[in-house]
Amino acid sequence: MTSASPAAPSLEAAATHVAPERRRRGVLLIRGATLVLGLIVLVQLLSAMGYIGFGFANWQPVLIAYVLWSAALCWGLVLRDGEAGWQAVFVLPAVLFTVALVIFPTFFGLYIAFSDWNLQSADGQKFNGLDNFWQLIADPYFWNALGNMVFYVGTVIVQYAIAFGLAMLLNADIKAQKFFRVAFLLPFMLSPVAVSWMIGKSMLEYRFGPLTHLLRNLGWEQPTLLTTPWLAKTTIALMDAWVWIPFMMIMILAGLQALPKDVQEAAKVDGATGWQGFWQITFPLMLPVSVTTVVLRIIFQLKLADIVINTTAGGPGGATDTISSYIFRVYKDRSNVGYGTMIAEVYLIIIIVFVALLLKFTSRYMQKAV
Amino acid sequence: MPHAAKRTLVYAALIVWTVVALFPIFWTFSTTFKVAKDVQMGNIIPWVDFTPSWLGLRAIGLSPDTIFTESTPRAEFLKRFFNSIQASVGAALLALILGSMAAYGLSRFSYHWKIWKNRDISFFFLSQLILPPVVLAMPFLVLYKELALLDSMVGLILIYTLSVLPIVIWIMKDQFDTIPQELEQAALVDGCSTWGAFFRIILPIALPGMVAAFILSVILCWNEYFFAALLTSSYAKTLPVMVASQTGSQGISWWSMAALSSAAILPLIIIGIFLERYIVKGLTSGSVK
């Protein structure tokens, strides 16, 4: 996801002259707004810590003050910098929004991670130093969930192979291509919660589910798909594949259709070329699209949670747990946000290192995105 | 292999996968109309294996005989349904506004904010994609409690906007990059302001990209479960949370679960059938050229 944008930004600000009076008003507005915001935060902070007797009932006014401050900042920049200010205002709202809702909570999370904090009890937050971290190091469920994540990420390669096959099929000279494309895409659009019920809880139901029924007819006496640990893990991986294969398929299909015309002819399934032609022509040409697709898919896979939570709730005995579903369970069981946040922050660091390494090794093969 | 045999194989494979993709959907819709006996017998084909009944729809007050009467389950269901619409459409709109502006700025101007240049800002937005929801979940729980935003629609819309914003920026930047800059330059010469050119010249051309980004955002928000399960309880609960909470409590009354699941996926299937072109455009923009 790194490369220079092809359309080099070139609409430079025509050096517009900003009148000194207007510039002064802009500066004044920004400073004034910042001062007001700082004051409101300070008052609320002092009141929350019990130093002063007045303040707001909750922190909502601070949020509103932040929104107003953002608006004042944008307006102030327009006044101060003229055309350059107008240009900054395109990007600034999104940046301020993301900073407030991602950067701040992530760092606030560190504060939670080092505390014992039961949301249900009246005691509130208590610092407990590195206790949560030591608990995590000794927590077999955490390491088990991390191991499962390796398995789930590994299945992406299998999904990729199937998706590539399907994309080749769709790219062949077939009738009703549009019908097949829509049919193949539909699973991707369905809510994971609904999928958990549709497949996990009903079609795989031990007594009456149509799939277990089918498996019994095929001679498998006890299809314990969701109760035998390794089987349950495989079943979750299959459901996840059912949802996500369409995504990869669409990406690869778009790649196939973007190949040069003569290569495309060779790439058609029912063309003259066979297995060899695929490995020598199509596959190498598709490498950039493939790598981009797989990397994106791995990044999404690291968030896997909904299907696990709703189908097995991590069971049996944590066999299907992902990190996300484990944290969800930890919170639901104990209402303690401290330990869950510690797991989440450690997981974030692992992910950042992993994705950075992944991008380092794959970026030279990738499509120039962004 | 002879040509005809090859074609047969291709179509066989296509049909097998069509069944794999569509059977669970067919199963869910048809189970809505089954009674307990049909479920236990594993009957599959309506009118052949079993006679459809209104049981599932009656359970959520939408069958012909209950639709004009008072119904608590229906009121509950409709509330969740409209909550989901509000949250997903609201978040998609907000993300589209913020994201289109940011994407246009990044596509057209060069910024130098201290050490930050365009590439760094783009990467800053995109890197949000890596962030798993769990990292934000607990801090949001605590912060929302302090901000009095727990179980509120505004809170849900804010966090959904956040989760789709990087995708919107990605799609829209790709869209703006394909529009030649001469268009704005001509408008600027004619006396249009930067923002005037953006609104009057560029946005109308970028409409397909905006539709794609909007639809993809709506789908992702409609299906979102993790944050909704943690941050909402009674007022702002969305449809996926309702579906999930029914799973445990109702045991084997499959018809009502099937009816709920059908209701949760039906809007998406309609979108998928009629707007597939835009979904594909949204998914593939930026990464496949």
Image: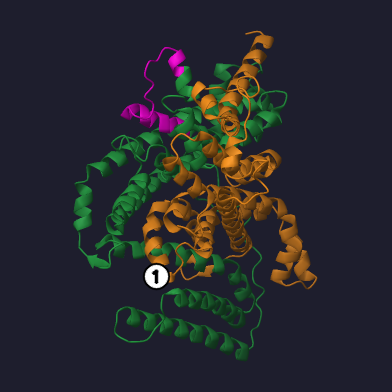
Chain colours: A green, B orange
What is the three-letter code of the residue carrying label 1? Answer: Glu
How many numbered discs?
1
Q: Is residue B260 left or right of residue A349?
A: right
Against A156, is A334 above or below? below
The magenta stretch spans which residues?
A215-239
Q: Quick one: quadrant of the C terminus of chain B?
A: top right
At numbered mark 1, what does the secondary structure look like: helix, strand or loop? Answer: helix
Seen from the viewer's position, the closer of residues B25 and B245 is B245
Against B276, is B218 above or below? below
Occupied quadrant, residue A264: top right
The chain identifier of the residue carrying mark 1 reads B
Question: Image point 37% across, 31% down: which residue?
Answer: A233
Question: Is A227 contained in the magenta span?
Answer: yes
Return the x and y of residue A312 as percentages of the image width and height: 38, 37
What residue would you read off at disc 1?
B146
Seen from the viewer's position, the closer of residues B53 and A27 is B53
